[in-house]
Amino acid sequence: MTPQFLKTMLDGHLGQIFATAADIEAAAGQIARQIDDATWQTPPLLIGVMKGAAQWTLAVSQQLTIQADLDFVAVSSYTGTKQSLPKLTQAPTLSVTNRHVILLDEIIDSGVTLAFLIDWLHEQQVASIQTAVMVNKPVARQRAVALDYVGFTLPDVWLVGYGMDLDGAYRNLPVIAEYKTSTSVSTADV
Ligand SMILES: O=P(O)(O)OC[C@H]1O[C@H](OP(=O)(O)OP(=O)(O)O)[C@H](O)[C@@H]1O
Ligand SMILES: Nc1nc2[nH]cnc2c(=O)[nH]1
């Protein structure tokens, strides 16, 4: 049974629900355990990629039991479902030089955003970079990016919820859901 409010909010565009809030918290917890168990010469610096990665960054960072620093960058490259060149609209406030950075993003799709940020972090002379993504959509990859921690690997459909948007909407949905660009009326899931 799909909560009625999701159907109402997405108004005929709701497709498959791939993960609930509980599934996402559990995936974030497993990743936090792996980060806990890794060997760190200095506390890692977690950097969330705003806006979309806000929820994911907190889900992972709040389940860590080791000391870690937390910061954010803002990058924007999508208007609707169309991508343009990524722009760094906000740099981290902490110094990243010589830091062991964990980049957290809620989704990797073409890979252009994370590849751009990884290049930028190398220019700032970080000590190391790891990546932790909530969703890996590998089908349309254009830039290869090494993924250290992955929550869910999903098909090539437009996703919304848990930070993922369509023109700014739906980020607050507590699930990862498919947004169908063509509307359909179904009674199967009522
Ligand atoms: O792998 P890619 O194809 O580059 O896509 C991934 C990026 O797309 C979204 O960013 P968006 O530009 O929509 O900004 P947002 O975080 O503000 O939603 C998302 O937050 C990722 O950062
Ligand atoms: N919201 C959202 N942002 C993306 N950026 C790249 N792929 C996606 C996607 O499927 N959904």
Image (spheres, helix red, strand yellow):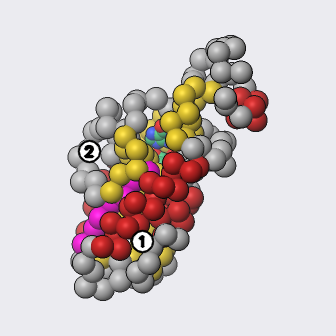
Q: Nearer the viewer, residue 177 or 101?
A: 177
From the viewer's perspective, tell me whether residue 105 is left or right of residue 144: right
Residue in the picture at 67% in, 31% down: 2
Indicate whether 72 appears above or below 154.
below
Examine the rendering and report whether any part of residue 116 can be seen: no
Q: Position of residue 148 (x, y in %)?
A: 28, 58
| Residues rendered magenta in the picture | 128-134
Q: Residues within 10 Å of mark 1 (few under 14, many from 20)?
A: many
Report the quarter where the N terminus lies.
top right
Residue 3, disc: none
Residue 161, how many percent across, how many down? Answer: 59, 43
Given the current orientation, which residue lies at the most extreme bottom position?
A: 42
**Residue 119, image x and y in percent?**
28, 61
Is residue 167 something that shows in the picture? Answer: yes
In the depicted structure, whether residue 57 falls above or below residue 39:
above
Give the distance between the C-alpha atoms of the residues marked 2 and 1, in whole angstroms. Answer: 22 Å
* Quadrant hosting residue 126: bottom left
